[in-house]
Structures are given as structure tokens and as C-alpha cells.
Amino acid sequence: MSRARCDKAARGFTVFGGPSDDKSNTLVRFATFAMQDPPEEAPNATDKKTGEALGRRIDETAQKLSTA
């Protein structure tokens, strides 16, 4: 088994309006996405900016958690 994704972090969000607020399907979907190969299509400029902004937020959060 490849360790290419070892020590990687991911982030996602979900909004569920049901009365039970069951997010198990979403969590399964996140796990499935995480196991897939990277997309072959290159991201556009807007996607890159969004990814960079998200990356900065993840880095800031990780820094705060590591010093807490």
C-alpha cells in the first residue's frame, strides 16, 4: 500500500437539514473522496485562489492547535 497520503490533512463541511442531523453518509463520502486519485484536470485560477486561502486557514489552525 502506498504511503503517498501519509500525514495529509483534509477539510470539508456539510449542512444537513434533516431532523436527525445524521452526517454518516457525508463522512463516508469524504472518506471515498480521500481515497480517490487526484483529478486529472488542472484547477482554474479561481480554484487555485480558493485552495490557497483554505490552505492558509488550515495552516493557521494547525499552528494554533500545535501550540495549545
Image (spheres, grey):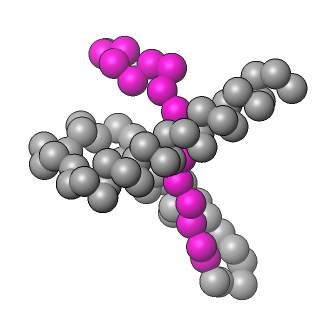
The answer to which image quadrant residue 39 occupies is: top left
Q: Where is residue 29? Give x, y as percent.
A: 43, 56
Is residue 14 at least partly visible in the picture?
yes
Which residue shows up at 56% across the image and 60% down it?
A: 13
Left or right: residue 60 versus residue 49 is right
From the image, which quarter does the C terminus lie in?
A: top right
Most frequent secondary structure within the magenta stretch: loop
Magenta stretch contains residue 48: no
**Camera-side residue: 42 or 12?**
42
Q: Give the range drawn in magenta.
A: 1-16
Position of residue 29 relative to residue 34, above or below, is below
The residue lying toward the viewer, choosing from 36 and 59, is: 59
**Residue for point 32% across, 48% down:** 48
Q: In this view, does 43 lie to the left or right of 54?
A: left
* One can see residue 31 in this view: no
Q: Please state the horizontal and vertical placement of residue 46, each as a whole percent of the image.
A: 30, 58
Query: Is residue 11 located in the magenta-colored stretch of the structure?
Result: yes
Q: In this view, does 21 lie above or below 2?
A: below
Left or right: residue 18 versus residue 35 is right
Is the N terminus in the top left, top right, bottom left or bottom right quadrant?
Answer: top left
Residue at the spot x=16%, y=46% of the render? 42
